[in-house]
Image (tube, rainbow, N blue to C red):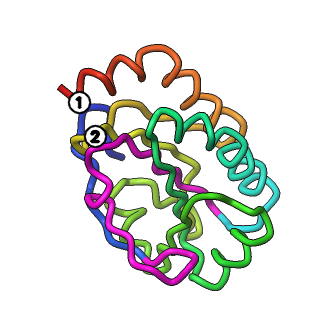
């Protein structure tokens, strides 16, 4: 698995809306990339809704959020619509993104891991927990403390 300090692997994936999204196109702003095992499952729903709940705070700090799972585009679209998520979900159906980040786990599903990528593309924080609760709250806590200073430093 990639670690804090590593350059985040660039990727291009298809979103729940059918658009192509490249991570490097978001350079200049911090990005949260959170991996989850299965769209629509109870834990992944809770995790995604937590990111949606905190999304206004993240956007206030110019942080973008991207969710990634190995589900196909249609499954991601249904999940996004059901949860009314304000951010893009990437369909990693070929599992290449999950492999690049080192989060591909048992049964070919992504493990629940969240990466914060700074404006220059480096991983500056990560949350790894099988539980859905610590991910959005961990990012919010980090942003409220050293994350804000790191983002300011990166903008110089």
Residue occupying image coordinates x 57% and y 21%: 141
In the rendered image of this protein, does residue 153 appear above or below residue 123? above
- Split into 4 quadrants, where in the image is the C terminus? top left
Q: What element carries label 1?
A: helix
Q: Is label 2 or label 1 in front?
A: 1
* Position of residue 50 measured from the top left corner of the image (x, y, whole percent): 72, 43
- Is label 2 in a helix, a strand or a loop? loop
> Residue 122: which quarter of the image?
top left
Q: Does the magenta stretch include residue 32?
A: yes
Q: How crowded is mark 2: few (under 14 residues within 10 Å), some or many (20 or more)?
A: many
Residue position for label 2: 119
Q: Residue 91 carries which label?
A: none
Which residue matches tag 1? 155
- The answer to whether residue 122 is magenta is no
Badge 1 local density, few (<14 within 10 Å), some, or many (20+)?
few
Horizontally, is 34 left or right of 75 in the view? left
User: Could you tell me which residue is drawn at 33 percent across and 27 percent down?
Assistant: 151
Q: In this view, does 142 lie above or below 25?
A: above
Image-based side of 23 in relation to 14, left or right? left
The residue that appears at 64% across and 85% down in the rendered structure is 74
Q: In this view, does 64 lie above or below 153?
A: below
Residue 95 % position (x, y): 43, 73
Magenta span: 14-37
Say which label, 2 or 1, has the lower sequence index: 2
Q: Pointers 2 and 1 in contact (CB under 8 A)?
A: yes
Disc 2 from disc 1: Cα separation: 7 Å
Q: Where is residue 99 in the image (x, y as percent from the top left)?
A: 37, 63
Image spot of residue 41 (x, y percent): 78, 63
Farthest residue, direction front: 60
């Amino acid at each position: 698995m990639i670690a804090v300090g590593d350059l985040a692997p660039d990727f291009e994936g298809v979103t729940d809306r059918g658009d192509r999204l490249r991570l490097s196109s978001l350079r200049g702003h911090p990005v949260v990339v959170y991996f989850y095992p299965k769209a629509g499952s109870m834990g992944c729903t809770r995790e995604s809704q937590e990111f949606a709940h905190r999304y206004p705070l993240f956007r206030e700090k110019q942080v973008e959020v991207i969710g990634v799972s190995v589900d196909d585009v249609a499954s991601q679209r249904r999940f996004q619509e059901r949860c009314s998520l304000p951010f893009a979900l990437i369909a990693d159906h070929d599992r290449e993104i999950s492999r690049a980040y080192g989060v591909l786990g048992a049964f070919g599903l992504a493990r629940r891991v969240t990466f914060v990528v700074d404006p220059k593309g480096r991983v500056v924080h990560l949350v790894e927990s099988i539980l859905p609760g610590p991910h959005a709250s961990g990012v919010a806590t980090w942003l409220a403390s050293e994350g804000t200073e790191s983002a300011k430093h990166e903008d110089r």
